[in-house]
Amino acid sequence: MSAASPDIDLTEPHLGEMLATAGLDVEYVRADGNTLFRRADDGTEVPVVDFAGGYGSLIFGHHHPEIVGALRAALDAQTPVYAQFSRHPIANRVAARLNEILRRDAGAAEPYFTTFASTGAEAIEAAVKHAEFDRSIRAATLLGETGARVEAAGAAVRAGDAVVAESAYAALGVAPGADGTGFDALVAEVSRRNARTAARPPVFLALEGSFHGKLVGSVQFTHNAGFRTAFSALAAQAVFVPFDRPEALAKIVEEERARIWDVVVRDGRVEVEQRDFPVFCAFLIEPIQGEGGIRAVTAETAAEIQRVTAEVDCPIVVDEIQTGLGRTGAFLASAAIGLRGDYYVFSKSLGGGLTKNSVMLVRQARYRKEFELVHSSTFAKDGLSSTVALKVLELLEADGGRAYRRATERGERIAAMLRGVRADFPEVVADVRGRGLMLGFEFRDQSGSPSQPIAALARDGVLGYLLSGWLLRRHRIRALPTASAVHTLRFAPSIEVSDEEIDQLEAGLREICAILRDRDEAGLFS
């Protein structure tokens, strides 16, 4: 068989087998608005309502005419796509518009400087790289200041202007020495302890249930052990804070806190004291966890995170990759809970459903201009994705924020429907969660179902995918589980989702709930 044979699936064949098992191995041939089209055996197009929404990437749906028009105009004008190491005025307009929105929605009093990337995970890594760049500079500055004070103390001792206090020796467990000072031994112990502290890896904090990507760095901040564990040796590990116990954060921070020893001269006495060392690199947080099961962070949790991180000068990275750009009824989901970021990360809908684009923004007080020379991305700031991003922002803000109002209204309509289904099937549906057009529908655990096939699927963690395949096959609905809470279906359609499409989803959910309630495995596989 030749290497070019179409009979060999060389594109993630194992994943393809899983899709086939779940009934999700469908090829879509066309997309328009809130609809995908596949071909039937007779060649006709079969419409499928898209409630997956590109994992939240399609706030305006597939092939929105104005976004397509902007992209075509840029192509017709032969806009340079890749002209690296030059000025990028379109990208700068995107950054300026984002800053205007941050000032309005987050009350940002200072500008945020912008680094462009291609994907959300890449932008997360850019944010973390910048945070670590800043932390390492602060750490080096502190160690340099400490070293200068050690030298000054040594000069004072040698000149007879100061003597080492007995308390200094006791604090570090160093003997005074035969010469009556023991200063060199004291300094050696200070240097040894400080070197050990300085060699500690940075501390990253994130919430249990978090998802921030699957790249080498970003996967370390993703709580799902199935995604993370195999790669834990590649980068510094995150410390995960219990999602529903924000009071645990203060204890965790105190346990991870680091201090170095400093030598100072006061009134002719050499003394030692401890100073906080900047070991905390960043706290990463999604205002609403997407892959974690559509779980919203409360204002109380946000306030506690804000308070504790400020005490140890740990910057907050607000991950708005899935929640931002209007999906929750506002540009920033974080603004609704009073969460302010030192960094913001956006992606998904920024590409308008046509391009790949992401941005990382860092506020001026933390910005390190040198970072621009040590970090880059070949495809960042390109002419086409920047043009699309500008059009997306224009559409979001048009008509006094119609898109935000529409996301809120459509979301409330879907949520009310989902709550109605839950009320009629309390033994099957555990919860309805989310905000705007980012909603989760959680099924109760079926691993104890009297139906052995259903129970086995639940125990294997694949029942959610089978339910998705059933909805696709029987009701022409595309909806998928969240990656780390596979009993929860996520609904993230475009703002133009219609009442008829919502009714279609309701009919499918009611039928599948009846199948689970009645333990009707024959109906599930029909």
Image (cartoon, rainbow, N blue to C red):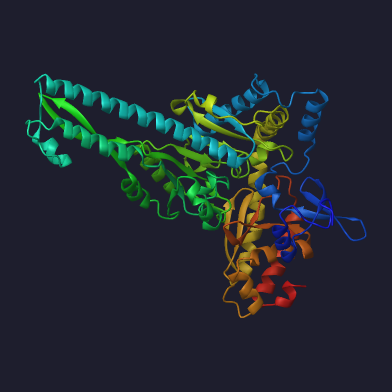
Residue that lies at the very extreme toward the right in this rendered image: 42
Up/down of 295 relative to 319, above or below: below
Rendered residue at 32%/48% (across/down): 255
Up/down of 103 relative to 254, above or below: above
Rendered residue at 76%/43% (across/down): 62
State left or right for residue 361 relative to residue 204: right
- Residue 166, quarter of picture: top left
Residue 445 in view here: yes
Q: Where in the figure is residue 360, as x and y percent of width and height?
A: 56, 33
Up/down of 453 relative to 177, above or below: below
- Residue 73, quarter of picture: top right
Q: Where in the figure is residue 206, as x and y percent of width and height?
A: 46, 47
Rendered residue at 36%/32% (across/down): 139
Q: How many marks overall?
A: 0
- Pick whichever, 175 or 9, lies toward us: 175
- Pick whichever, 354 or 402, lies toward us: 354
Residue 272 in view here: no
Q: Where in the figure is residue 273, as x and y percent of width and height?
A: 20, 34
State left or right for residue 1 relative to residue 18: right
Up/down of 306 relative to 388, above or below: below
> Which quadrant, please, contains the C terminus?
bottom right
Q: Where in the figure is residue 442, as x and y percent of width and height?
A: 59, 62
- Pick whichever, 174 or 80, lies toward us: 174
> Which quadrant, please, contains the N terminus?
bottom right
- Pick whichever, 176 or 430, lies toward us: 176
- Residue 161, quarter of picture: top left
